[in-house]
Amino acid sequence: MLIQRPDPIRPSEITSESVFVKRRALLKAALAAGLLPGTMARAQPVTTSTLGDLAAANGRLENVSPWADNPSLATTPYEYVTEYNNYYEFGTGKGDPARYAHTLVTEPWSVEVEGEAENTGTFTLEDILRPHALEERIYRFRCVEAWSMVVPWVGFPLGDLLKRFAPTSRAKYVQFFTLNDSEQMPGVRSRVLQWPYREGLTIEEAMHPLTLLTVGLYGRVLPNQNGAPLRLIVPWKYGFKSIKSIVRIRFMEDQPRTSWNMAASREYGFYSNVNPDVPHPRWSQASERPLGAGLFASRQPTLLFNGYAEEVADLYTGLDLVRNF
Ligand SMILES: Nc1nc2c(c(=O)[nH]1)N[C@H]1C(S)=C(S)[C@@H](COP(=O)(O)O)O[C@H]1N2
Ligand SMILES: [Mo]
């Protein structure tokens, strides 16, 4: 197989304010080039896992970093990304997932695909990942609770996977489910949400090239608390749309139910696009607190579609974003 040598990755490129930076890099070279801060020594290196074998087999890591035009952005420290989490299956505290998610068994893993598609059935994680080259993408990420992060995710476009299942013309939506196992997930004994955790996208959103199915962050395999082994990232939507530890994908004709909407429909709509002009019923969404910037750092203004308006606004032409929140 042809293995391409990458350009060295310079920190100046990572913090670049350019809207769209694109480059290719070998995963190993990315690691060697110092992309990863030293504080990540504790993290599992990609190369020791099945995932690492797949990345090696793929031979390359494509590096695509879409940025909104904001020079103050910098990647959030790894500790914040992996120790301040929302993953209610492991508790509702921000520290609970990092503390308790070690009980999640991520190998072996399989995903059931059902509904409006030609190729349905059960697929192993390997089936899912094998044909796809992994990319690194640095995305803004914003929780509905008004904190935000900038994270280098490792994954590939969800649409590339969904096409392999050949959705039918009736597939207008895609629904996703997280594992629901009280043995592994102490939080599902609580009734704070209805389990399994579920989320949904329109088929156009799911097929959008920015929508990423991720297996890693900061060049490492996803820690359990961040949704190992397979986790969705939809960077222009509030964080709860980015469902973790996916075990089921369902193509649907009708709009799917989603856990947060089922819990509080006035507060969490189906779309949940980041929008500074549409307040949550209990708080403003006009600004956000960048995680890891320090307690006294000033909040920053929230951007429409989390800064990805240029890429995704087309998906919503003619849609009233206040009614369809
Ligand atoms: N299965 C599952 N997925 C989930 C959640 C959850 O509780 N369970 N929380 C969501 C919310 S509210 C946010 S903000 C993000 C947090 O992702 P992070 O912990 O990787 O930052 O995960 C989302 N995905
Ligand atoms: Mo969130």
Image: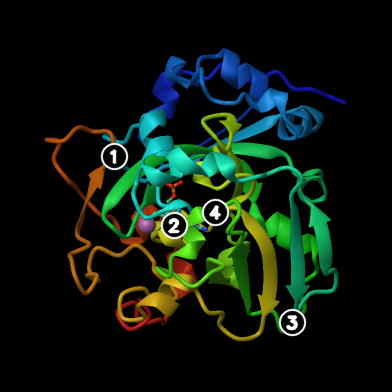
Q: Is residue 16 visible?
A: no
Q: Position of residue 283 (x, y in %)?
A: 18, 66
Residue at (54, 54) in percent of width and height: 185
Q: Position of residue 110 (x, y in %)?
A: 76, 54
Looking at the image, which is closer to me, 313 or 125?
Answer: 125
Q: Earlier in the sequence, mark 2 or mark 1?
A: 2
Residue at (68, 59) in percent of width and height: 247
Looking at the image, which is closer to me, 240 or 30?
Answer: 240
Q: Position of residue 249 (x, y in %)?
A: 68, 66
Residue ID for mark 2? 88
Instruction: In the rendered structure, find residue 154 and report the number of the disc placed on it.
Output: none
Q: Nearer the viewer, mark 4 or mark 1?
A: 4
Q: Position of residue 258 (x, y in %)?
A: 50, 74
Residue at (71, 55) in percent of width and height: 160
Q: Earlier in the sequence, mark 2 or mark 3?
A: 2
Residue ID for mark 1? 291
- The residue carrying pointer 4 sits among few (fewer than 14), some (14 to 19) or many (20 or more) residues within 10 Å by Cα, namely many
Q: Which secondary structure, mark 1?
A: loop
Left or right of 272 on screen, residue 135: right
Image quarter of residue 177: bottom right
Q: Earlier in the sequence, mark 1 or mark 3?
A: 3
- The residue carrying pointer 1 sits among few (fewer than 14), some (14 to 19) or many (20 or more) residues within 10 Å by Cα, namely many
Ligand 1 within 8 Å, label 2 CB = yes
Task: Name the quarter where the N terminus is drawn.
Answer: top right
Residue ID for mark 4? 185
Ligand 1 within 8 Å, label 4 CB = no
